[in-house]
Amino acid sequence: MISTRLTERFGIRHPIVCAPMAYVTGGALAAAVSHAGGLGVVGGSYAGTLGGEPDLETELARAKSGKFGVGFITWALERAPKVLTKALKHSPVCVFLSFGDPGPFAAEVRDAGAALICQVQFMAHIDMALKAGAAAVVVQGTEAGGHGASRSTFPFVPEAADYLEQHSPETLLLAAGGIVDGRGLAAALMLGADGVVVGTRLWASADAFTPKAHTDKAIGVTGDSTIRTKVLDALRGVPWPREYSFRFLKNKLTDGWADREGEAFRAFGTLSAKYAQARVQNGLDTVAVVCGETVGLLKDRPSAESIVKSMAAQAAGLLRRGGKLKFTSQS
Ligand SMILES: Cc1cc2nc3c(=O)[nH]c(=O)nc-3n(C[C@H](O)[C@H](O)[C@H](O)COP(=O)(O)O)c2cc1C
């Protein structure tokens, strides 16, 4: 087992956190990850403001057989702050906030005894997280599935590690974006992270809410098949702040709207009803199959337990053996 500041802080066996994925991480997935020795974080998603989201109270109750956290999209939580108050009554060990200023929620999270974990996309966001008293900062690379921005995991993690060492050495650092197996976990630890947040790999797990049609489409494609775009949110009328974009599998809709971002913003919301209908019917020419670049490494849809355990075991093996490196004494 790999022991890090993350495993010690949360009393878990593996430095692996399940991303709070909107519409995907319910209580069953969070519980499966926690029982396997990681930390499951239930997706509080858009705090009920977007519609069609799983009932959060039900999912939190399902997660309760083990340690669990809850995560929200911060700008959406601002529209329904009471959802946080209700969620905290379930005693999550952490609250994961991404995409916006965590400051307004920090005191409530702290007073409830939960650790504040802030997912950030730029160096400038780290200061916001530190100001809010975050126990951990998750730096999210652009490789990630779902919403994110433009920094790449490989340079972002060590830059954040150096920054935290200088400005707030007690704050934990987690890496997200592109971590799909033990190689990614080992690399993230070498780059200075205390652990990882895993989305896409657990999205394609038996315990996730992900529709089968989505993983059927995703398994077997290469990592070239995803796109990061702002077009879809504009067309379906979801008011994401402009600094964030959305990564998912390219489809007919993204092919048709390639390089027409300005036009899509002018057509804001015009696809909203059609999108809602396509979602119900799994119309994948329109609907986003939300996964990251690691989709090219997915071969199956196993249990979350086997994903977490094999990721941890592979990373431990690699770190023990130093990968496949050979060392010579010649300079
Ligand atoms: C299907 C899906 C939904 C996501 N939804 C959210 C969300 O609601 N809130 C959030 O903070 N991050 C969300 N993310 C991003 C994850 O928190 C995480 O940064 C990302 O999955 C890590 O990269 P990876 O997908 O390469 O593992 C989502 C990711 C995916 C794949």
Image (spheres, grey):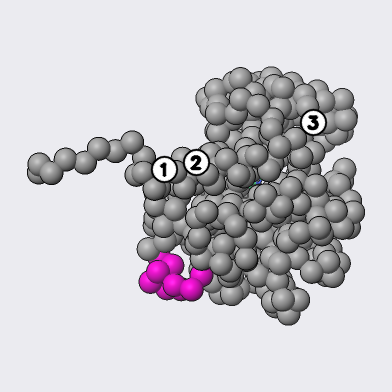
Q: Report the quarter where the C terminus lies.
A: top left
Q: Which residues are magenta?
A: 163-173
Rate crowding at label 2 as few (under 14), some (14 to 19) or many (20 or more) other CA atoms within 10 Å: some
Question: How far separated are the C-alphas under marks 3 and 1?
Answer: 33 Å
Could you tell me which residue is drawn at 36 percent across and 44 percent down? 321
Q: Position of residue 287 (x, y in %)?
A: 76, 29
Question: How far separated are the C-alphas under marks 3 and 2?
Answer: 28 Å
Decide which of 242, 207 is in the foreground and name it. Answer: 207
Residue 145 showing in the rendered view: no
Decide which of 243, 56 is in the foreground and name it. Answer: 56
- Whether the magenta-drawn stretch holds residue 274 is answered as no
- Whether the magenta-drawn stretch holds residue 172 is answered as yes
The residue identified by callout 3 is 211
Q: Position of residue 114 (x, y in %)?
A: 70, 71
Is the residue under label 2 in contact with that under label 3 (CB below 8 Å)? no
Residue 251 showing in the rendered view: yes
Decide which of 168, 275 is in the foreground and name it. Answer: 168
The answer as to whether callout 3 falls within 8 Å of ligand 1 is: no
Q: Earlier in the sequence, mark 3 or mark 2?
A: 3
Q: Quadrant holding ligand 1?
A: top right
Rate crowding at label 1 as few (under 14), some (14 to 19) or many (20 or more) other CA atoms within 10 Å: some
In the rendered structure, which amino acid carries the disc numbered 1? Leu
Label 1 sits on a secondary structure element that is: helix
The residue identified by callout 1 is 318
**Residue 235 — which label?**
none
**Residue 314 — which label?**
2
Q: Quadrant of residue 14?
A: bottom right
- Decide: is 82 above or below 76: below
